[in-house]
Amino acid sequence: MGTIGMIVVLLSCIVGQVLNNKFSRYSTAKLNANLTGAEVAAQMLRRNAINDVRVTCTQGHLTDHYDPSNKTVNLSAAVYYKRNAASAAVAAHECGHAVQHAQGYPFLRFRSAMVPALSAVSQYMTWIILLGILVVEMTPLPLEIGIGLFGMTTLFAFVTLPVEFDASRRALAWMSKQGVVTTQEYAMAQDALKWAALTYVITALGSLAQLLHLVSILNNRRRN
């Protein structure tokens, strides 16, 4: 792992720890509107005239996500049942993805279209890259293929960024407009979502750093 890779890993650990601390702190701030995360989600979907999306409770910590394949907003128990600024922020954010889906948000459509291809190649990509590195002195072809496949995952990581930032923007705007959060609660929700978004930024940068490292291996072989 190169210096850039180590820096990315360190940043990922720091951002992850800060994110956990933020959510723990904001989870103690009881929501003035006295709504659970599930109720916030249901209300946001209803106000956006989305009637074909279900809100479900899923296992795990910070496992909240929107699944466009079956139109479900999946909230962890800490979000689904709790009445605080953090749960409201997460629930609204995931519903932001549902609104994107309903409105045909271009980056979400592009991201969703990439999923089948990435799922198909993900189980072989690591082995192809490893083989490519091992035989690069004999032939660059396997590594070139591996770089092409890994480039798809890097593109996916960067396409995810506008999807996540836009969902947070929609969530915050809706909560503010509907009076779901007070001014102080809005600041908490905004801060929590900012740190959550940073995890995606770190992931994208880490993927780019690894891609550039693979490209440098290939270029070194070509110069020799």
Image (cartoon, rainbow, N blue to C red):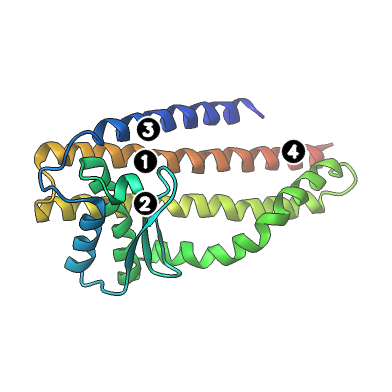
Disc 1 to disc 3, how far (Cα)?
9 Å
Residue that numbered label 1 is attached to: 196
Q: Which residue is mark 4?
A: 217
Residue sitting at 22 percent across and 33 percent down?
Answer: 28
Q: CA distance from mark 4 to mark 2?
A: 32 Å
Residue 125 appears left or right of 79: right
Mark 4 vs 2, N-terminal side = 2
Mark 1 or mark 3: name the one nearer the start of the chain.
Answer: 3
Instruction: Please tell me how crowded label 3 is: few (under 14), some (14-19), or many (20+) other residues with Cα within 10 Å.
Output: some
Circles 1 and 3 in contact, beta carbons < 8 Å: no
Q: Are marks 3 and 4 in contact (CB under 8 Å)?
A: no
Image coords of residue 44 (percent x, y): 21, 61
Q: Which residue is mark 2?
A: 164
Relative side of 129 to 55, left or right: right
Asked whether disc 2 touches disc 1, contact meaning CB atoms under 8 Å apart, the reply is yes
> Crowding near pointer 4: few (<14 within 10 Å), some, many (20+)?
some
